[in-house]
Image (cartoon, coloured by chain):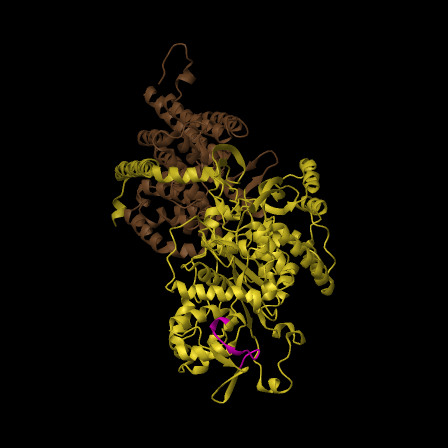
Amino acid sequence: MISSAIIPQPLARLPWKLIFIVFGICAIGLVTLYSAAGGSWRPWAMKQGIIILIFFGLALAVSWIPEQTVKQLTFPAFIGILIMLVAVEAIGFVGKGAQRWVDLGVIRLQPSEFMKPAIVLTLARFYDLIPASDVRRWRGLWPAGALIMVPATLILVQPDLGTAMMVMLSGVTVMFLAGLPMWYFLSAAGVAAVAGPILFATMHDYQRKRVLIFLNPENDPLGAGYHISQSKIAIGSGGFWGKGFLNGSQSHLNYLPEGHTDFVYATMVEEWGWVGGALLILAFLMVVRWGMAVARGAPTRFGQLAAAGLSMTIFYYFSVNLMMVMGLAPVVGIPLPLVSFGGSAVMTVMLCLGVLMGLERQQRTRTSLA
Amino acid sequence: MKAARYTGAHQALTFSRRMLLVGGAQLAVGGALITRLGYLAIAQNAHYKLLSESNRVQLIPVPPRRGWIVDRNDKPIAINRSSFRVDIIPQQLEDRPRVIETLASLLQLPPDEIERIERELDASHGFRPVSVADNIPFDQYAAITVRLPELPGVAPSRAFARYYPAGSAVGQLVGYVGSASTQEYEAENKNPLLIIPGVKIGKEGLEKTFEKDLRGEPGGQRVEVTARGKLVRELDAKPDRSGKSIKLTIDADLHDYAARRIGENSGSIVVIDVPTGDILAMPSMPSFDPNNFSDGISRNEWKMLSDNDHLPLVDKVTESLYPSGSTIKPLMSLALLKAGIDPRTRVFCNGTFPLGNHIFHCDARHGSVAMDDAIIRSCDVYFYTMSLRAGVEYIAPMARLMGFQEKFDLPLASQRFGTVPDPEWMQRRYHRAWQAYDTINMSIGQGNVLVNPLQLAVMAARIASGRMLQPRLTGSRRSQMPDLAVSAKDLEFVREAMGQVTIRGTAAAARLPFDSIAMAGKTGTAQVRRITMGERASGGVRSNESLAWRMRDHSLFVGFAPVENPRYAAAAVIEHGGFGAQVAAPLVRDVMTYLFDKPKGLAALAAYEGSIGGSLDQRISQRTAAWRAANGLPPLRSDPT
């Protein structure tokens, strides 16, 4: 921590190490967006910078909410988001072939984004509330299962497979950390292996196509496999040091589709090479490690589970995107948080970081008081 | 139950243990991601770099100029003429219906052309231009150039079109060029050059056989393009290399002269330079104008050519086979001499030759004839008698030695080499033994004997030179040609007899109009129908004039000049032309006249063309107009040149 007589206490108390890393990631994102626009702050980099500042302010604000208040707000917020998810279905705005937004006039809200941190906090609150003896009982399982499945199902029918998967993964992680019997998870994994083909049969055509193309993108290099093929070409052609800033031909000549959103990582690696790509992965891992450290140090059960779950949400966010752009996972439409152009992912990650910073600040002040 | 003992302490322990597990999983995934990144960016870098480059850089082929075809004196036979064309670059096209409508009105495009353009635009993508019109007049080109700002995506350009100055006279020889078909494109492994609008490849004749030399090396403009095919910038260019010129042995003027001299007839003539074997002329008429084909031929034009019973699409020099008729007699004499028959031995000809219950005829009663008389007056009975005496085993080899049934090493797309029958062939083909009447038929070049005009010319040239002459269309002097396996004395005898043919024989009309230069020759008349006994009985054989064109005899003539020390040899076959002396012999006479004295030859041609209704071009346009009128088509608008 920066401790200096000149710097006011509230500022000095901020987790500067984390903020440096996060801003580092954001800076990489802005530089990449600047390049993706052909060397221009418009139309993406400038806007993205403003979005980041706004949501960072939001994160700081959230970090000042006491843990107690967060606990109290958790269930009402969860219910509110569920209502919004239903509303999306009912009066949903049609865009990108899927209903994902509620248009409030001033802003368009994507309630499924809120659900990512919300599911973590709700489950943390749930396992905080029930007695330890109930955790390994049926009573410790089914409410949690329902709390995950209801929003996940609503998101799945939007349809937004990627977000639904992330909500489920985050929720299950909290359940895992809450101490539910190990055989639950092992057998669930077994069932998933069996259910995979069944799920595949019920998928939307475009999703099924994406899975098939994921398994073999070169079969259809100009059709639906185009995204993955071109992304791999961009990443692979970068080499160790990259082609250099503003020299990425794949993105500049538009061979790489969605080079400023979902595939921004490919744009970045093409110009900055393995070095840049690995640095970004390390930066994300450090953010996650910081969050996990907050979880370990948390004095309350809610704090432990919430901090670990939110860290995992950030982890899932970036790792699923990276697996996707490098051809290790199907294209499910998950952006790279803080780097891809767009507000939703920034908002989710900043909310997670806000709560994490709040938990961290409170345990630090508490220990200093002690 | 275990759960009953599960307390807060257990919970804390479980939490920290599982945190370790989760943290380990995070590290594992992070490690996997960095490893995967390394695999793609470092291990597979070369592979992906190549793919990225082939994305970024596209090669726009720059078509090479086609090589010229020139005659022995470097006079052009096939050249390139600058022309104007219009293409559409689909990528840059905006407001397609309006642009196409404007183009259609400026260029007066017919509806089926507009349909083709629409179709090709639908099928094309990116940077590949779609051809709108080829070879347009300058004023249309100018009109489009002026309106370019309101025609986005339209690209008028100067290109080169193939031009054949001699027009239809060289049609059969050079063939024509055209845009590559799908099959040709596939056959060349999708050579991108072939689908550039305006690129033509050889389709027939020499244009096809010399395609490899004539085409040249395409250049390339390397350009950086976006995924949508938009050009970003030009990179380095590779210059194209023009195709090689092909120099023929043909004498373009002579070829043109001979073509015109064939006139309205259906037939061909071959002229060979005796000392070298160079083919100086080999027109086949009527022909087609390869200039029309190079712009893409219309369906009507094609139909008009296919409907013509004079077969303008067949190269009669090498693809048509005829009975040699009496033109076989000089080589028959050589065979008889070789068989040891004394040329002074006389045979009495009373006009008929009975064999079994069949009577073979001669066209006159020649009385008592020796071998030289038999050649000069073309007596069939002499050859019937003597060929039976010598036997087929002397005749067939001599015919082959003289070039019958021989396929020459010439750059021609197809050569039909005909038949020299012999007992073995008869057995194979008709499953019967050789009979005496087969020998008799063969002795006058009828029956199963089939030759093409080129072989006849080679025969004349071989007799004239006494060497194993090989005809050629390209290349320069080769090593000395070997002597024929025939005694010089026999050759001298036959040459002398052939020399008398134009003096007091069947081809007196073919005498050259010179005091010092005489032509040796032999006429031939090849029957295309069977003359029945009944017809002979009822007042004699019908004259050719009274028969339908298709039933008339072919008229043949072979010759060389001068008789002593021959320089040129020629053979002409006029389909259904009647007696050899009637049509083919005067044709060869005029061509020879032209060779020795151009003004005299041209005067003869002018007189001839005057008698048949004008020059070649005039007659072709008349015929086209007549054909269009007969088929209910509007007259052609004047040629856009």
Q: Residue at x 49, y 43 (%)?
A: B243
Supply the letter of whichever chain is brown.
A
Quarter holding the C terminus of chain B is top right
Residue at the far bottom in the pictured view: B357
Say if A127 sits above or below B164 in the image.
above
Rendered shade, chain B? yellow
Q: Is residue A99 above or below residue B286?
A: above
| Image: B456 above or below A352 | below
Residue B396 seen anywhere in this rendered image of the structure: yes
Q: Position of residue B478 (x, y in %)?
A: 40, 50
Indicate whether residue B367 is drawn in magenta.
yes
Q: In the rendered image, which quarter is residue B344 located in?
A: bottom left
| Residue sitting nearer the eye, A338 or B576 | B576
Q: Nearer the viewer, residue B236 or A255?
A: B236
On the image, the x and y values in percent for residue B231 come to 53, 36
**Span highlighted in magenta in the image:** B361-372
**Residue at image point 46% right, 40% down:** A115
Residue sitting farthest toward the top: A5
Q: Is residue B275 left or right of residue B511?
A: left
Residue B168 falls in image quadrant: bottom right
